[in-house]
Amino acid sequence: MFTSYLSSAVRAFIKHKQHFFLNLFGLSVGLAAAILVALFTRFEMAVDQYQPNAERTYRLSQYFTVMGTSAPITNLYAVRDLAKGTDIEDIFALQMHPRLSGDFNANGNFFKMEDLFAATTNIRDFIQLDVLYGDLDATLAAPNKMALSESEAIRLFGRADALGETISKGQIRYQVTAIFKDLPDSTHFTFAGLVAMVKEAPNYRINNFYTYVRFSEQANIAAEQALFAKAYAQLVYPNQEMGFVEVSFQPLTDIHLHANSRYELKANGSSTVVVISFSLSILLIVLAAFNFINMSIAQAAKRAKEVGVRKALGASKRQVINQFLLESVLITLLAALLACILVELVLPTFNQLVERDLVLAYFSDFGLLLVAIVLLVGVLAGAYPAFFMSAFSAKRVLSGDIQRGRSASLVRKTLLILQASLSIALIIGAFSLQQQLQHLQSIPVGYEKQYRLEVDDIPARDLYISQNHALTQRINNIDGVLASSISDASFTSTFNTSFSITSDNGVLRDSVIPFVGVGFDIVESLGLALVAGRDFNRAHGSDWYNQDAQGNSHASILISESLVQQAGYSNPEDAIGKLWYSKDDDRQDVMRIVGVVADITMGSARDESSPLILICGLSWANEGKLIIKFEPHLFESVKAQVKQLLADELKVYNPDLELVADNYQALYKNDQRISVLVNVFSLLAIFLTMLGTFGLASFSALRRQKEVAVRKVLGASRISLVNLLAKEYLLLVAISTVIAFPLTYWFVGQWLANFNERIEQALWVYGVAAVTVAAITWLTVATLAFKAASTRPSLTLRYE
């Protein structure tokens, strides 16, 4: 019986070639897109799932409510103290430390060490790490020993087995005693070198540890977090008000998709990207299935006599259903095979887009899932056509009385309306995404992004103490440099520090305000908008931070415009010259306001701008940055001379030189990725809609060819005949527009609500989307209708 079904299916495919190829091509495109996104989604969802006891492991994170910023770094000493007597079984930490930054000497060559951390000895209880050579446990238990990743060992020493080699920084020498396999992309952890933690007295004021805890199986995480957060704040921030900081436990398996701090170990993924791309891939399969159902129903009239003959010869309804279901599954399997070929061709480009190394493994659980989904799509897509065609009456079919019924027509029109609605919605979404991204690039952030060079990874001591402003004077002498300054925070990222401020009028009293340590000429160098007062400059030597014998300090500050209002001044000019104070134990810092700048949005436009203080010559950070304003046509020359100057003056051989504009664009990488995905899927959705319309229009033109011939004999023009056939489809597009507009408006509005700065939805975008789909539909139908209208009536009517 199966052989009979199979041979009948092959004959049907050969006889109805157009129907077969349209279905095959549409399904293959939809399945290929779905496979690509399924690979991406599977990878993103599996990040860190394989780590030891991953389901019971959490990372501690702090959210500073006053500054409105979060950081996944905490104080290890406080965590250890507070963990006693709780359900925390074990604690692991990675530490950032000043001694681990900067350039290292390996065999006489200077290298910037990538991702070098100090780690606790229990690292392999928390991270699956394969040791290739040496003893990792012994390395992390002793000072002046280092473990390197395989790729880092090759980079530094030219070989993976680099045991016994030495690497030094200043007077500190490390011996390589372990080599571990490179961490895979499927983890949020990233480190290329590990050293032992330095044993030192507990200091509760240090926040430079990525701290992970593992709870016992019976632990109540919510209760533990509530108690822990309160105790942590009291221990680490005893002088701050309650609510100054919120401590939370982030599940290890959620970090990659849900953590959005600017201090992550590496750039994380986005749950939004995964949800949108997965949803769009499902839509494509649905569109392809709609095409299949539509065209199968449209072909029912052509195959009605076949069904009638089968029934007249004794075929049961079940056998007819099985025949058409088999044909549907066969088409889907062939489409899956073609889809896999398309995936292999497109996968390298897709990997570049999502920045992952995805591979389609056929003989795996994913391969079995793919086969199951293909069979399911085949059965579901073919179910309605099979039941519809099996319901034909043999007597009525063979007597020539074929009634397709209103239900079939209604199904076809409904599916076509849904296809057009989805296409319109995707076009609107693509336009809106692009407009929002362009808006984010153009909104004022309080500083200039163009023609500014940021030089990172310079020891802060060299910038603020040993060299202070002498280095920027040398940089200013470089041809092509218009101005330069220093900063201890990237304005495209976030501030690192804050202090308690009391204003002269008492309105601000021990208020926690974030600050950035900067140098002379910061307004000119970074293009800040000066509202009142002046910039820091060398003519006013007292601007630079200095301490007296008692430890009290004096410095000049710039404050943001919103801070002027917060401090109770009626206008920015009233704040100039006022003295503000900050106390720390027995020391008092006196700060004179010399200027007011427009509010600065640090980081993404998703984040609200915070009140901010720029202080001249003071930094609590480990590393600083140079900000250089340059002439565009001399950029390469400036970059080369700055690198040479840093090597000569500071022995910094591998600084990171980045354009501020590039760093700002990088903030929206996930949004740009969403935009590209939506654009691609929108084009595919339009293509599938056009494919479905082509198939139905082809059937419609064939069914109405005698009507067209009669109308032509009676004097109808070609264009009138084209419009006659296209009118039905344009009406369906109009209904699609009515459905798509309100739903799309709501969904796009929800997405835009994530931004503090956002566009208003433009009505012209909705008009363009509707006109585009209508125009494509008309052109598709018109192509076939024009051919039918151009056929000589005698060829159609000669048998009548």
Image (cartoon, rainbow, N blue to C red):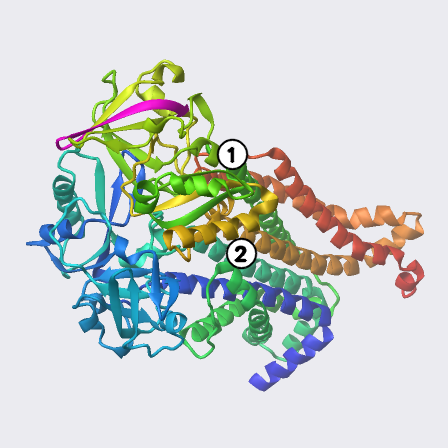
Q: Position of residue 479 (x, y in %)?
A: 55, 43
Q: Is residue 23 visible?
A: yes
Which residues, given as a range, are shown in magenta? Answer: 583-596
Q: Do residues under tags 1 and 2 come within 8 Å of each other at their CB atoms? A: no
Q: Which mark is residue 121?
A: none
Q: Earlier in the sequence, mark 1 or mark 2?
A: 2
Q: Nearer the viewer, residue 353 or 754?
A: 353
- For this view, does 709 lie left or right of residue 175? right
- Residue 551 position in % (x across, y down): 17, 32
Q: Residue at x 47, y 49 (%)?
A: 642
- Residue sitting at x 93%, y 61%: 794
Instruction: Name which residue type carries label 1.
Output: Ile
Q: Quadrant of residue 454?
A: top left
Residue 475 or residue 325, whichever sits in front: 475
Q: Residues within 10 Å of mark 2 (few under 14, many from 20)?
A: some
Helix, strand or loop status at disc 1 = loop
In the picture, the quarter occupied by the C terminus is bottom right
> Looking at the figure, which quarter contains the N terminus?
bottom right
Q: Is residue 236 above or below residue 535?
A: below
Amino acid type of the residue that numbered disc 2 sits on in the rendered structure: Leu
Q: Nearer the viewer, residue 486 or 369?
A: 486
Residue picked out by circle 2: 283
Residue 443's disc is 1
